[in-house]
Amino acid sequence: MLLAVDIGNTNITIGVFDNDKLSSTYRMTSDKNLTIEEYTVLIRETLNDISVNDCIIASVVVGLDETFKTAVDSIFNIKSMILTTKIDTGVKIKLQNNEEAGADRIANAYAASKLYKLPAIIIDFGTATTFDIINSNKEFIGGIIAPGLRLQLESLGKFTSKLPQLNVQESKTAIGHNTNDAILSGVIRGTACMIEGLIYSCERELGERATIVATGGYCNLTAKYMNRQFDYVNQSLTLDGLKNLFELNQCLVH
């Protein structure tokens, strides 16, 4: 079995691959304050009775990748791979500073390049809402980073004195007739409008129509308020990209 581990700012998603099939997924909270010993216990309990042969880890949390790697390696007696720009990323990264390319975004880019017609725009709905742009030459040329839905709602509740703290949910109307509905319209519908506008702007700069791929928990909710629909919704895109990148670089650990 191969573990594909996506360490985000909020959650850690673990995919278990049996050959090419994603057989199961698990989630735990990202907490960089936990020790190696605590993660070892947590991983043992989560992956009880699963035989693991290999592991690849992508992380956007500084230091947590090494902590997780140490715990996994000690449990399964393996040598986990950490995704960085120092390994074969499968796509050519063409940023002003390639080291700024997030590991999850590299995984998304490579998965999209294998699965979909290029150019492609990958929109990932996580703590941040990110766009990753892959041109027709299979080059990761950059993207967009904006606050995610939950982060926007939390910020309004935290940094204003009278606005309530709301959870992510449907927006009933564009015109909010009470405070709650006004907030939801601004955040949920506003994000949908932002995404549509940015897709248009990116395609104009690319000079051609792109394949739009969405991933992440809130993509279906946001799509309800968009005229331009996603061409594909793939909730396992990052994990699939990690599996493919491991296969591309497995000579590094064997």
Image (spheres, helix red, strand yellow):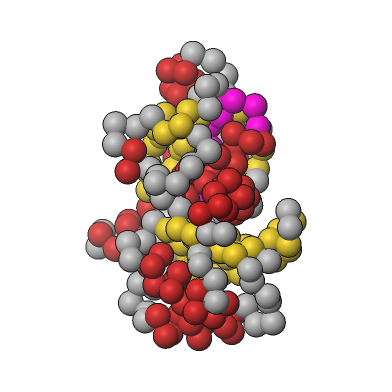
Residue 198, given in percent of the width and then of the height, sits at 44, 29
Residue 124 forms part of the magenta stretch? yes
Residue 216 at least partly seen? no
Whether 158 is drawn above or below 142: the answer is below
Q: Is residue 159 visible?
A: yes
Instruction: From the viewer's perspective, tell me whether residue 182 is left or right of residue 218.
Output: left
**Residue shown at 55% from the left, 76% from the top:** 77
Residue 158's x, y, as percent?
29, 63
Name which quarter of the figure residue 190 lies in.
top left
The question of residue 8 being in magenta is answered with: no
Q: Name the spot of residue 141 as percent of width and height, x first.
A: 42, 29
| Residue situated in front as seen by the camera: 44 or 171 | 44
Q: Main secondary structure of the magenta part?
A: strand
Q: Magenta part of the protein: which range? A: 116-125
Q: Residue at x 59, y 25 (%)?
A: 118
Q: Quadrant of the C terminus?
A: bottom right
Q: Position of residue 201 (x, y in %)?
A: 43, 22
* Quadrant of the frame with the N terminus: bottom right
